[in-house]
Image (cartoon, coloured by chain):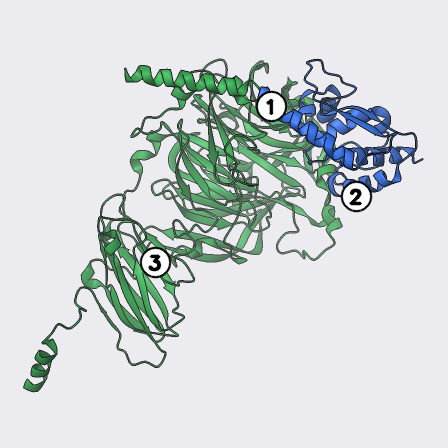
Chain colours: A blue, B green
């Protein structure tokens, strides 16, 4: 257990160092920490994202990066409307879930499918476990921005 | 004392596994109890209690394991070439893989079925299906070799196969892909599916004495996907049940488009009625092309025959032949209880498991309690056929087998578990996790009239972290459960070849005593056999050279061959003269573009070799046979095309001339 923790700490430190080089805009911030507390927060989900601050304005740069990720890793199963394909459509997803939940779900899919009540309810409808697509932390943020822009469309 | 040591060791190792597991909440260790290792332990030198015949999935082969040890006993080559056994490489076995498309070296074997008499395994044969290029194979359990393969016309994706009736009267094959029939124009737009595509169910008769298969008849059905099937037994003998999905008749993105309807169907086929129609001449003779390949045990040679006719019965025209039972959400498994009374449909996307009553079905048919018809086939009222539903069993039910205590065991792919429930009251009794995403499961004798009920094996689709990693491709994982008690207990993980789909478990006693140990030389009727070293020879027929060769510990006869020329086509017909169990010989020749041979005692096998350069070519035995195995070798001399080196062959005589010998030769010459 100690070993696991120390590895996680190392990972966190590594991430923090990486973050300094490409500093995100001041209004968009991401807090990551090892959360080993037993209480499960269904608003946040489970994963490394504890607090994600989203600037009011859409960051087109992130959207652009998110579009690329969507095309490669998401579009085979998720439509941008509210229509279910393999998984649920994305329309309105940023209104239904907090950014932390979404970013945790796309980066920590298996664990959340085993734990999160909303994810499990969705699984009972879709019956296909969302695969772990190895989405990076940055890409999780990019996808979120892409979803946010999609939700602004009329 | 020895015993104590073993238990002590066991305790420590299990405690260790627990400790390791404590960091990972979903690790299997928390479902393993202390006596698991002892239950799966078969001491060195001891036999397993059961044979487990397992589909090799995309490897195209079938494997035989021992249970409870999980030891791999043999990979039986069926629909793919197998260099280990020479299958598909030797001239004798190549015809086994012939089809109407020519030689197909690799297919996909999904389901296995042991032959039955009176609804129980009889230990004679095991059948397998080729899912890709539709075929059914029969494997002889005396030799563990593929004895016969029959191709299926009007079919594509032979998934609903090779399920068989309780006396092995028929092996069936339902087509997974519907396609335009072979004699119709298939060059039509894909989106004319509803109009032009048909589903075909093939009934292959199996001769009681020798297992010989014939394509008896086919039933043409509406175009959708036939997934799995099971024959009725006991009270329902005479009927066959097929699960159907894509009754939406979609031709694209089936993942979404074939999941639209609330209910698809289980098709009930009255095959006794089909026999009556067949006798009455109600079938249509259709011109088709399919291969029928047979391995002859006395000539050690396979032959492939192309057949051109099949009789087709029309489900739309012929009354009382077919009925649809509505079944929720894309049914996959379609399993019949030991008595034959209950038919379990497993909707891949359903939240319940419907259990249908056979007698209720008959009453529904009698009362014409139909809710309509689909392409001329009556659709029975769901509620009238339904015996009951298993409520909230799990997510993604797939397959069900049975024990000897009135219980059923269903695999759940999405929720990765096996769920035990009672057939009578439909109550869930127990559930155990699998690692991970179980597909098929099998209970010892689980599809017979008298299941054994001792073991259950789950065949998982995902292996992930169960074994030491081996790069991106991982071995498949089977898991053995002891189901003799109230609670199912995981006792062993073991890796399998290919991707295991269905498998069956039969008592070893049924099979092991009939095993062929070697081929008797006096029964060897191979055209090119050499029965005894004295009959070995090399015969030139134009540019074709036949080498009649023998192998015995530890030399080939002949082992020196000269006079082979570039442009020749050379056939090595090697007969293994050994007459004892477990003494195969191998045969390899340098630069053979084709293969090597492995020859069982008393057997003859042929390797075709086309020399590609002038020079000296070694041959040797590739299967360690004796202390002097390394001495089991020889040479073939290859000369240029126009060479006048005479064709000679010898064993032990072609020695270098010793000093003075030349003079003696001179003297001899002078005398003449």
The subunit letter for the residue under badge 3 reads B
Disc 1: which chain? A
Circles 2, 1 touching at the beta carbon (< 8 Å)? no
- Pair 3/1: label in front: 1
Q: Nearer the viewer, residue B559 or B511?
A: B559
Give how far apart the Cα atoms at labels 3 and 2 are.
54 Å
Q: Is residue B366 at least partly visible in the picture?
A: no
Tell me, for residue B588, which label it has, or none: 3
Quadrant containing the N terminus of chain B is top left
In the image, is residue B655 above or below residue B41?
A: below
Number of on-image labels:
3
Q: Are marks 3 and 1 on the same chain?
A: no
Q: Residue at x 81, y 35 (%)?
A: A23
Q: Mark 3 and 1 residues: CB-CB less than 8 Å, in contact?
A: no
Q: Earlier in the sequence, mark 2 or mark 1?
A: 1
Q: Which residue occupies the foreground of this view, B302 or B566?
A: B566
Between the C-alphas of marks 2 and 1, the distance is: 33 Å
Q: Which label was assigned to residue B471?
A: none
Left or right of residue B648, residue B128 in this image: right
Is B102 located above or below residue B359 in the figure?
below
Is residue B265 left or right of A51 when viewed as pictured? left
Query: In the image shown, does A123 or A109 lie closer to the viewer?
Result: A109
The residue tagged 1 is A4
Eye-nearest disc, 3 or 2:
2
Q: Which mark is residue A68?
A: 2
In the displayed orientation, state which residue is furthest to the left: B671
SS for callout 2: helix
Element at badge 1? helix
Where in the figure is residue A82, as x and y percent of width and height? Answer: 84, 32
């Amino acid at each position: 257990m100690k070993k696991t923790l120390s590895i996680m700490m190392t990972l966190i430190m590594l991430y923090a160092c990486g973050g300094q080089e490409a500093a995100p805009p001041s209004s968009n911030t991401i807090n990551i920490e090892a959360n080993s507390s037993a209480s499960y927060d269904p608003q946040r989900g489970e994963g490394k994202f504890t607090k994600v601050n989203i600037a009011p304005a859409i960051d087109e740069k992130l959207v652009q990066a998110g579009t690329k990720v969507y095309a490669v890793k998401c579009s085979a199963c998720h439509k941008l409307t509210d229509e279910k394909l393999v998984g649920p459509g994305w329309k309105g997803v940023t209104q239904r879930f907090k950014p932390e939940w979404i970013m945790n779900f796309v980066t920590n899919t298996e664990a959340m499918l085993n734990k999160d009540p909303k994810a499990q309810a969705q699984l009972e409808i879709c019956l296909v476990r969302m695969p772990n697509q190895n989405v990076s932390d940055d890409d999780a943020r990019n996808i979120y921005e892409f979803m946010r822009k999609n939700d602004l469309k009329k | 004392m020895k015993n104590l040591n073993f238990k002590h060791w066991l305790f420590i190792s299990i405690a260790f596994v627990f400790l390791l597991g404590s960091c990972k909440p979903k690790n299997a260790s928390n479902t393993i109890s202390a006596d698991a290792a002892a239950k799966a332990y078969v001491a060195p030198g001891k036999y397993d209690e059961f044979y487990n015949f397992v589909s090799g999935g995309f490897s195209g082969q079938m494997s035989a394991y021992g249970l409870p040890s999980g030891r791999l006993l043999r990979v039986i080559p069926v629909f793919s070439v197998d260099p280990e056994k020479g299958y598909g490489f030797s001239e004798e076995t190549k015809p086994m893989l012939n089809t109407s498309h020519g030689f197909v070296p690799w297919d996909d074997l999904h389901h296995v079925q042991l032959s039955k008499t009176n609804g129980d395994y009889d230990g004679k044969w095991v059948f397998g299906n080729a899912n890709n290029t539709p075929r059914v194979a029969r494997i002889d359990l005396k030799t563990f070799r593929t004895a016969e393969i029959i191709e299926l016309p009007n079919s594509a994706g032979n998934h609903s196969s090779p399920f068989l009736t309780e006396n092995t009267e028929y092996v069936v094959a339902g087509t997974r892909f519907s396609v335009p029939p072979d004699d119709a124009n298939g060059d039509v737009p894909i989106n004319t599916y509803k109009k032009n595509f048909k589903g075909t169910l093939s009934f292959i008769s199996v001769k009681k004495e020798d297992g010989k298969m014939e394509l008896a008849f086919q039933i043409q059905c509406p175009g959708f996907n036939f997934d799995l099937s099971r024959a009725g037994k006991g009270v329902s003998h005479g009927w066959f049940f097929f699960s159907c999905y894509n009754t939406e008749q979609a031709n694209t993105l089936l993942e979404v488009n074939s999941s639209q309807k609330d209910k698809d169907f289980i098709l009930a086929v009255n095959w006794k009625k089909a026999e009556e129609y067949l006798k009455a001449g109600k079938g249509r003779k259709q011109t088709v092309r399919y291969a029928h390949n047979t391995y002859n045990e006395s000539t050690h040679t396979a032959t492939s025959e192309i057949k051109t006719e099949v009789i087709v019965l029309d489900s739309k025209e012929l009354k009382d032949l077919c009925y649809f039972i509505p079944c929720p959400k894309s049914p996959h498994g379609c399993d019949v209880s030991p008595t034959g009374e209950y038919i379990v449909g497993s909707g891949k996307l359903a939240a319940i498991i419907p259990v249908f009553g056979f007698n209720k079905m008959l009453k529904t048919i009698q009362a014409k309690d139909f809710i309509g018809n689909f392409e001329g086939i009556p659709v029975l009222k769901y509620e009238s056929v339904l015996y009951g539903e298993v409520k909230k069993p799990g997510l993604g039910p797939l397959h069900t087998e049975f024990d000897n205590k009135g219980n059923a065991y269903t695999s759940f792919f999405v929720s990765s578990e096996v769920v035990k429930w009672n057939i009578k009251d439909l109550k869930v009794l127990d559930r155990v996790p699998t690692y991970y995403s179980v597909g098929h499961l099998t209970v010892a004798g689980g599809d017979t009239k008298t299941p054994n009920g001792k073991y259950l094996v789950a065949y998982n689709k995902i292996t992930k972290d169960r074994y030491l990693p081996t790069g991106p491709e991982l071995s498949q994982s089977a898991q053995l459960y002891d189901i003799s008690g109230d609670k199912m207990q995981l006792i062993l993980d073991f890796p399998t070849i290919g991707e295991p789909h269905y498998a069956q478990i039969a008592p070893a006693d049924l099979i092991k005593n009939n095993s062929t140990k070697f081929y008797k030389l006096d029964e060897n009727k191979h055209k090119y056999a050499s029965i005894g070293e004295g009959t070995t020879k090399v015969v030139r027929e134009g540019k074709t050279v036949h080498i009649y060769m023998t192998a015995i510990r530890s030399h080939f006869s002949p082992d020196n061959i000269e006079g082979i020329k570039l442009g020749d086509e050379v056939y090595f017909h090697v007969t293994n003269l050994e007459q004892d169990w477990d003494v195969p010989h191998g045969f390899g020749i340098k630069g053979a573009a084709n293969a090597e041979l492995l020859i069982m005692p008393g057997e003859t096998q042929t390797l075709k070799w086309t020399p590609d350069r002038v020079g000296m070519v070694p041959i040797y035995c590739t299967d360690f046979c004796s202390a002097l195995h390394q001495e089991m070798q020889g040479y073939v001399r290859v000369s240029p095309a126009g060479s006048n080196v005479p064709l000679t062959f010898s064993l032990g005589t072609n020695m270098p001339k010793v000093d003075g010998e030349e003079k003696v030769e001179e003297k001899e010459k002078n005398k003449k």
